[in-house]
Amino acid sequence: MNPLNILQDMQQKIESMLQNSPAKDVQAHIKSLMNSTFNKLDLVTREEFEIQKQVLHHTRLKLELIEKQLDELLNSESSSIKNSMNNTNTVTDSTGINNNLNNYAHTVE
C-alpha cells in the first residue's frame, strides 16, 4: 500500500469518528466560546496592526521633519534678532555720539 493512501485513509477515519462523536459538539462549543471571548477583548487583526504600525512610522517621520524645520527656523530667527540688536546698539551708539558732538559744538560756540 502507498504511504500517502494510508495517511489519507487514516485522516478520513478520524474525521468520521469525530463527526459521529460528542467531541465534535464540544469542539464547536469551545470554538464558539473562544470567539465570543476574543470579541469581548476588542482585538485587532494582524493586517490592521500592520497598517497602524505604518501610520505611526510615517507620523514619526513627519514629526521629526517638523521638529528639524522648527529648530532651523528658531536658529535663523535667533540669528536675525541678534543681528538686529547689534544694529540697534550701533545706531544708538552713533546717535549718542552725534548728540555728544552737537552738545559740544553748542558749548564751544
Image: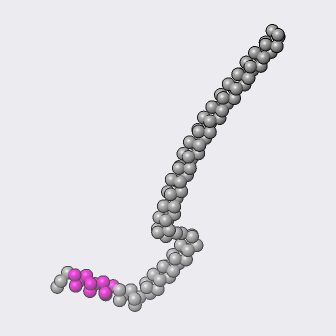
Task: Please say whether residue 5 is one of the residues in the magenta stretch.
Answer: yes
Task: Point out the image quarter for the C terminus.
Answer: top right
Note whether 109 is above or below 37 in the view shown.
above
* On screen, residue 42 above or below 100: below
Residue at the spot 61% in from the left edge and 41% down from the top edge: 74
Q: Position of residue 54 (x, y in %)?
A: 48, 61
Residue 75 at x, y percent in the picture: 58, 38
Would you say the magenta stretch is mainly helix, strand or loop? helix
Which residue is pictured at 47% across the width and 64% down the height? 50
Residue 65: percent from the left, percent from the top? 53, 50
In the picture as drawn, the residue positioned furthest to the top comes out as 108
Measuring 56% from the left and 46% from the top, which residue is drawn there?
69
- In this view of the protein, which residue sits in the foreground, 60 or 39? 60
Along the line of sight, the residue nearer the viewer: 48 or 93: 93
- Residue at x 55% of width, y 77% of height: 36
Q: Where's the N terminus, which quadrant?
A: bottom left
Where are the magenta residues, as a range? 4-14
Q: Which is nearer the eye, 43 or 58?
A: 58
